[in-house]
Image: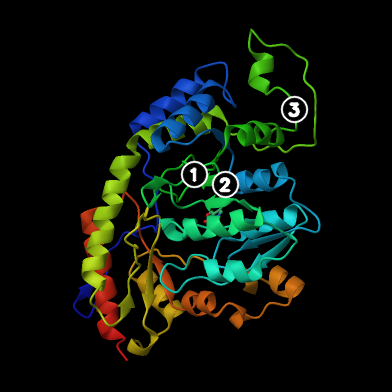
Amino acid sequence: MASGTFTVRDQFIPFSPPNIGEEEIAEVVDTLRTDWITTGPKTRRFEQEFCEAFGCPAALAVNSCTAGLHISLATLGIGLGDEVITTPHTFCSTVNVIEHVGAKPILVDVLPDTLNISPSAIAAAITDRTKAIMPVHYAGHPCEMDEIQAIADRHGIHVIEDAAHPVSGKYKGRTIGSGTNPTSFSFYATKNMTTAEGGMLTGDPDFIARAKVVSLHGMSKDAWKRYDKAGGWWYDVILPGFKYNMTDLQASLGLGQLRKLSAFQARRREIVARYHDAFGSSPFFEIPVERPEVESSWHLYVLRLNPEAWRIDRNQFIEELKARNIGTSVHYIPVHIHPFYAEKYGFRQMDFPVCYTNFERMVSMPLSAKHTDEEIDYIIEATLDLAERFRA
Ligand SMILES: Cc1ncc(COP(=O)(O)O)c(C=O)c1O
């Protein structure tokens, strides 16, 4: 199909396809041929290799980033009557887990360039009920951790890092997850590395040992230790924990993905450079930033439309790209406008103006190590063609 001089391709380009190769497939098949398919030796190996790759003091593989965040709050004893400060500019799970433990989420606005939580807004929201700050390293761009940590230390409260996006990202030379804060990574299907569903909680070794018990029914011994030849059948339940363990099938995928992550990251940076080149000097777009003190993992490439340059809005822009067989997404629908949160806390759209006004003009462009040069050329051509067609 041709539209003007632009020819629409036949095949749809997905927003973020996983990049699974023969190595992962072989590792999964190898696990399937053994007598142990749930949490066991491959999960422990995945934790160990993840720690080695990013300098983490300790790690616990779990079945999602959400699980890692929930376990963190529960392990730190945060609950009823407590407040946790976080951002509305995130996936709902960051805030849902605060509700799960019975604490109150205190949302504060984000910085205009990175869309990460604003340290000065955090400082202004601290009360004597505040027990933790949950920064989200949005799109893979690390938050202002020195400032956030200083606020937390001053008030003796915890920092729990939502690291769903920044795997391999660095803040002032320090890799995310290499510190002692509870830090929860996601290996969801669209992430830079995937186990289909899964996550990794990293942090201080004592904290991780306690979190491990919380993650599996509060049992004093995990199943592998009980069913192994050297194991015994007795276990004690020492608290009412959850069922958040990762399986060896997932860990098999993770081991293969982790070994290829540097190559995936190099490919992501190539694509980002091409998008920057194409859109960086255009009056139609604002391109994502990477502050000089960080290395982003470039989980997302979030383009912001300059509304005054367009005759169409963000939603129509997405529909036009879809009509040209290009998949995109929006990260995120702000938490405070979801009905549950709006009704429970009486939030209105403009309570967090930086978050809301940027949400209205943002679109996440396709970004995966699997995208080919030809696909990226096509996406750029289609996007620039749209800009000309719908110029204000
Ligand atoms: C910022 C953020 N936090 C948490 C999560 C939850 O991750 P998971 O699906 O692994 O639970 C996501 C998932 O996309 C996310 O984007």
Depicted 153 relative to depicted 249: above or below:
below
For the residues labelled 2 and 3, the Cα–Cα distance comes to: 21 Å
Say which quarter of the image contains residue 90: bottom right
Instruction: Tell me which residue sits at (18%, 78%) in the image.
Output: 5
Q: Secondary structure at mark 3?
A: loop
Q: Secondary structure at mark 2?
A: helix
Depicted 4 relative to depicted 218: above or below:
below
- Label 1 CB sits under 8 Å from any ligand 1 atom: yes
Coordinates of residue 117 in the picture (x, y in percent): 52, 65
Instruction: Tell me which residue sits at (39%, 26%) in the image.
Output: 26
**Amino acid beneath label 1:** Phe
Q: Earlier in the sequence, mark 2 or mark 3?
A: 2
Q: In which quadrant will I find the C terminus?
A: bottom left
Question: Which residue position holds label 3?
Answer: 219
**Amino acid beneath label 2:** Cys
The answer, for residue 141, to whether it is visible in the render is yes
Residue 187: numbered disc: 1
**Amino acid beneath label 3:** Met
Coordinates of residue 9 in the picture (x, y in percent): 27, 64
Image marks 2 and 1: residues in contact by CB distance under 8 Å: yes
Most extreme residue toward the top, as rendered? Answer: 229
Q: Secondary structure at mark 1?
A: loop
Residue 109: numbered disc: none
Left or right of residue 336, residue 269 in this image: left
Q: Earlier in the sequence, mark 3 or mark 1?
A: 1
Dot 1: within a 10 Å radius of its alpha carbon, few (fewer than 14), some, or many (20 or more) residues? many
Residue 65: numbered disc: 2
Coordinates of residue 29 in the picture (x, y in percent): 45, 24
